[in-house]
Image (tube, rainbow, N blue to C red):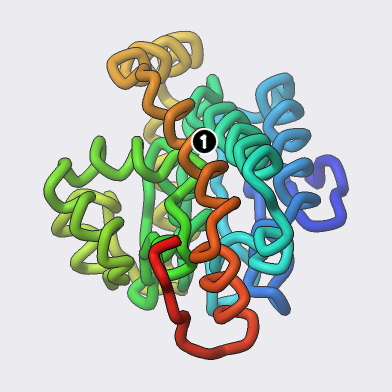
Amino acid sequence: MTSAQFDTLLLEVDSDRIATLTINRPDKLNALNAQVLDELKKAFEEINGDVRIGAVIVTGAGDKAFVAGADIKELNRLNSTEGQKLAAKGQAIFSQIENCTKPVIAIVNGYALGGGAELAMACHLRIATENAVFGLPEVSLGLIPGYGGTQRLPQLVGKSKAMELILTGRQIKAHEAEEEGLVNDVVPSEESHEAAKKIAGKMLKNGPVALSKAIAAVNAAYRSEGFSKEAELFGELCDTEDFKEGTTAFLEKRKADFKGR
């Protein structure tokens, strides 16, 4: 059975009470723009209130990308106030996903970069296809992760590995991500939905109220002021020359020439 309709998302609920939410911009590698963020917010509001839904699978359309990142054209125009506001908005939406009362499983099918990696990390579990690639390359744009990446990555892989990945912007493939604890399992692409539904099915055999309370209890261990600091620093960077140079260089497909200003 099909649920609500969106312009950039597909939301379907099957007879096993499992919803599949697909970011549906394959021609843009499912990049997160303002519309996608707004529709993610609305979708999870619906999911939380829909008694038909017991668990959620989040994935990206096509076989190239889960979500390849944020829309750089939108970022390029930001000043510090707008940047901090955008980061806070993204954080709020991803926290809404993290605090969903129903288990949320990401199928990371292809590239999960920047905001895409942050979206995957906001989900409760992550299953990667064999072609999955993770990365937080924001420093190459003169930025930092702004949707919670500086906070969630250390929780998943530890501070030292998170520092390495954030400060170098290095991308890692599926099996390294599994070794580091970033993903729960790696499976062939054609088996990913079956694998996610199998895990969801095991969860749905348990008490739904207990599931929601367990999610809340685990999340309570990670409350911090780091998210607001991340948004503040993200905003400050939007007023730097390096940010303008980094995002412009990306759009012009050339190497950035950073001046440290």
Quadrant of the image occupied by residue 186: bottom left
Q: Tag 1's secondary structure?
A: helix
Horizontal side of 3 relative to 243 (left or right) equals: right
Picture coordinates of residue 41, whole percent (x, y): 71, 35
Quadrant for the C terminus, please.
bottom left
Residue drawn at 54 percent across, 79 percent down: 64
User: Disc 1 residue type?
Assistant: Ala
Give the vertical position of 100 relative to 36 (above or below): above
Residue 18 visible? The answer is no
Which residue carries the number 1 mark? 231
Q: How many marks?
A: 1
Question: For mark 1, does the 10 Å Cα neighbourhood hold few (<14), some (14 to 19), or many (20 or more) residues?
Answer: many
Query: Which residue is at the front of the view, 144 or 70?
Result: 144
Residue 259 visible? The answer is yes
Residue drawn at 73 percent across, 60 percent down: 77
Picture coordinates of residue 30, whole percent (x, y): 65, 66
Horizontal side of 61 relative to 235 (left or right) equals: right
